[in-house]
Image: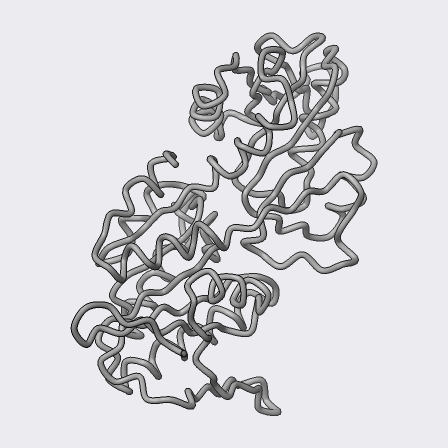
């Protein structure tokens, strides 16, 4: 069946964009529904076209699309999908974006800059979305950018369970790769029952200004160090932090991050870094040529499916966004 029916006439329908079909299929299987068939293609000038092949009138629609490269194309496709559902009289539209595009542009650092994360939220509201769902937003304040409910899901339990099953937390230190991630690292340390360390970056006054010194604040010598972050993009920050930990006597270095953007030199940097294992989720598709021996990819589909079901059944999603299982 293409939809899931609750008591009365309420119908859940799942719509998947073209950016991450494997994740779409996994979520659909977990929910026990079929993806609603649609026609989607690009015109010669790059414009996008979407049309659903079934009636969506009165349905509870969940529109799943991960904002991977080319990120502007997939955001636009999801916006068009939402607009099509609104004009076809869907009763409620929930935008499911495992990775929220432009989330790092969440404030103005200097004059004449945009706040692009707010713009993305505004566009989805204008298109017709009633609710947003995302995993590990870059900053929690993004929840306030959307005029409606926002379900902020956490991948921490999934990642932490993998780490605790494979490694001894008794000799582990959780490490924040920079000052901006300390709060997240603190939650990890509480979860695993470990000490916390921080990589402090500063400019070396004895060398040219562009050279930075990575100071390690905390106990890392002889310990397994777990670097935690919300995403790995070019991997510059995480690999430099790993080098600093190794230089300060860390026995092993592990990395856990939700979103594997893996842009440009990321794979080469991670392969050559001395990091024992890099654990990520599949919120973003990872092509075969971006895989490497020390990479472990965990599926986020069970979390998304559970959250979608809770929203559809008017249940509670609190445990999914406060870090509890």
250 is higher (above) or lower (below) than 325: above
Q: Is residue 228 left or right of residue 91?
A: right
Q: Is residue 56 left or right of residue 244?
A: left
Q: Nearer the viewer, residue 272 or 72?
A: 272
> What residue is shown at x 42% (from left), y 71% (from top)?
33
> What residue is shown at x 75% (from left), y 54% (from top)?
290
Which quadrant is the N terminus positioned in? bottom left
Which image quadrant is residue 286 in?
bottom right
119 is higher (above) or lower (below) than 160: below
Q: Position of residue 10 (x, y in %)?
A: 21, 73
Q: Position of residue 14 (x, y in %)?
A: 40, 72
Q: Position of residue 18 (x, y in %)?
A: 55, 74
Q: Is residue 25 left or right of residue 150?
A: right
Which quadrant is the C terminus positioned in? top left
208 is higher (above) or lower (below) than 7: above
Q: Is residue 254 left or right of residue 72?
A: right
* Residue at far right of view: 272
Q: How many marks?
A: 0
Q: Nearer the viewer, residue 43 or 257?
A: 257
> What residue is shown at x 54% (from left), y 36% (from top)?
159
| Coloration of the structure image | one colour
275 is higher (above) or lower (below) than 259: above
């Amino acid at each position: 069946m293409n939809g899931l029916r609750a008591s009365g006439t309420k119908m859940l329908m799942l719509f998947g964009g073209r950016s991450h079909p494997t994740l779409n299929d996994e979520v659909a299987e977990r929910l026990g529904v079929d993806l609603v068939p649609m026609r989607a293609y690009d015109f010669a000038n790059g414009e996008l076209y979407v049309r659903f092949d079934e009636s969506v009138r009165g349905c509870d629609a969940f529109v799943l699309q991960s904002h991977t490269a080319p990120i502007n194309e997939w955001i636009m496709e999801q916006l068009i999908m939402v607009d099509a559902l609104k004009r076809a009289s869907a009763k409620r539209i929930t935008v499911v974006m495992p990775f929220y595009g432009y989330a790092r542009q969440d404030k103005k650092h200097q004059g004449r800059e945009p706040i692009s994360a707010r713009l993305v939220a505004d566009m989805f509201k204008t298109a017709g979305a009633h609710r947003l769902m995302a995993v590990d937003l870059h900053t929690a304040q993004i929840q306030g950018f959307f005029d409606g409910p926002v379900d902020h899901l956490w991948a921490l339990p999934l990642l932490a369970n993998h780490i605790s099953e494979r490694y001894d937390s008794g000799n582990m230190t959780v490490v924040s790769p920079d000052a901006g991630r300390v709060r997240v690292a603190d939650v990890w340390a509480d979860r695993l029952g470990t000490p916390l360390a921080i990589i402090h970056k500063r400019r070396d006054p004895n060398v040219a200004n562009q050279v930075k010194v990575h100071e390690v604040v905390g106990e890392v010598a002889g310990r397994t160090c777990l670097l935690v972050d919300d995403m790995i993009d070019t991997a510059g920050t995480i690999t430099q932090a790993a080098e600093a930990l190794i230089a300060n006597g860390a026995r092993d270095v592990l990395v856990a991050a939700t979103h594997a953007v893996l842009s440009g030199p990321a794979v080469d940097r991670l392969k050559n870094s001395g990091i024992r294992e890099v654990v990520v989720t599949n919120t973003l598709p990872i092509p075969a040529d971006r895989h490497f021996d020390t990479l472990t990819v965990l599926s986020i589909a069970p979390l998304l499916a559970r959250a979608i079901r809770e929203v559809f059944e008017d249940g509670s999603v609190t445990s999914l966004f406060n870090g509890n299982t």
